[in-house]
Amino acid sequence: MTHQRGLSAILLLGALTLAGCASTTAGTPTVKEAQEQAASQLPGADAGPPIDGCALLSAAEVSDLIGANDGGRPSGISTAGGGCMWENQTTYHSVTVEVGNPGSAPGGVLPKWDPMLGEERKVGTDMRDINGGIEFAAGDRDCMVQVSTTDSAADRASGLALVEKVRQRVG
């Protein structure tokens, strides 16, 4: 009997806790509202509709790199930028493109490197390696491309070729 009362008390406490999480105090934004408000504060938030990252590369360009793929899925958290990830469902090879908001790379210069991320690995004079991807500026936007297969040297060369295509198409 004591065990049942203890279990009932735990269940009641859990239900009350969940009920408290579902509501907000008057004037306190929900998590979604807070995220939308934070996004509206980002550079370029008022720059119009986002870029369609999936339209930056043709189906043939992606297929040449990873073979048959899912056609691309939009990604990214920026408000006026955009991204896309294409994946070969058999090999799990992928291509990713991310385009930042206008103003995220003012004057075509990448944001200052945060040393908390480790040592900066430059690629040429105006790009850097980000965990196998390549970060670069396209116009005034901070962008990234990544090709991921089983051949890292070819992935790097393919990524560098994509940098130039994305720069031309975003720029």
Image: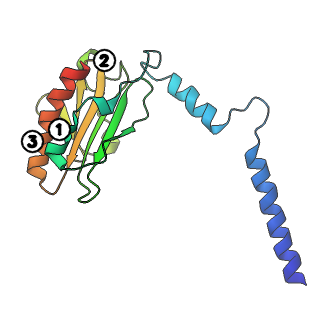
Instruction: Name the secondary structure under disc 2.
Output: helix
Q: What coloring was used for the rendering? A: rainbow
Vertical arrangement, residue 143 with respect to residue 2, above or below: above
Vertical arrangement, residue 68 with respect to residue 140, above or below: below
Q: Nearer the viewer, residue 100 or 126?
A: 100
| Disc on the earlier residue, 2 or 1 | 1
Q: Name the quarter where the N terminus is drawn.
A: bottom right
Q: Residue at x 36, y 24 (%)?
A: 51
Q: CA distance from mark 2 to mark 1?
A: 32 Å
From the viewer's perspective, is the residue at label 1 or at label 3 nearer?
A: 1
* Residue 14 at x, y percent in the picture: 77, 61
* Residue 143 at x, y percent in the picture: 28, 30
Tell me the kind of residue under disc 3.
Answer: Ala
Q: Which residue is mark 2?
A: 106
Instruction: Name the secondary structure under disc 1.
Output: helix
Asked whether the viewer can see residue 137, the reply is: yes
**Residue 157 — which label?**
3
| Disc on the earlier residue, 1 or 3 | 1
* Residue 4 at x, y percent in the picture: 86, 79
Asked whether the viewer can see residue 112, the reply is: no
Q: Residue at x 38, y 23 (%)?
A: 101
**Residue 60 — which label?**
1
Q: Residue at x 26, y 15 (%)?
A: 107
Q: Nearer the viewer, residue 42 or 112?
A: 42
Tell me the kind of residue under disc 1.
Answer: Ala
Q: Nearer the viewer, residue 29 or 85?
A: 85
Q: CA distance from mark 2 to mark 3?
A: 26 Å
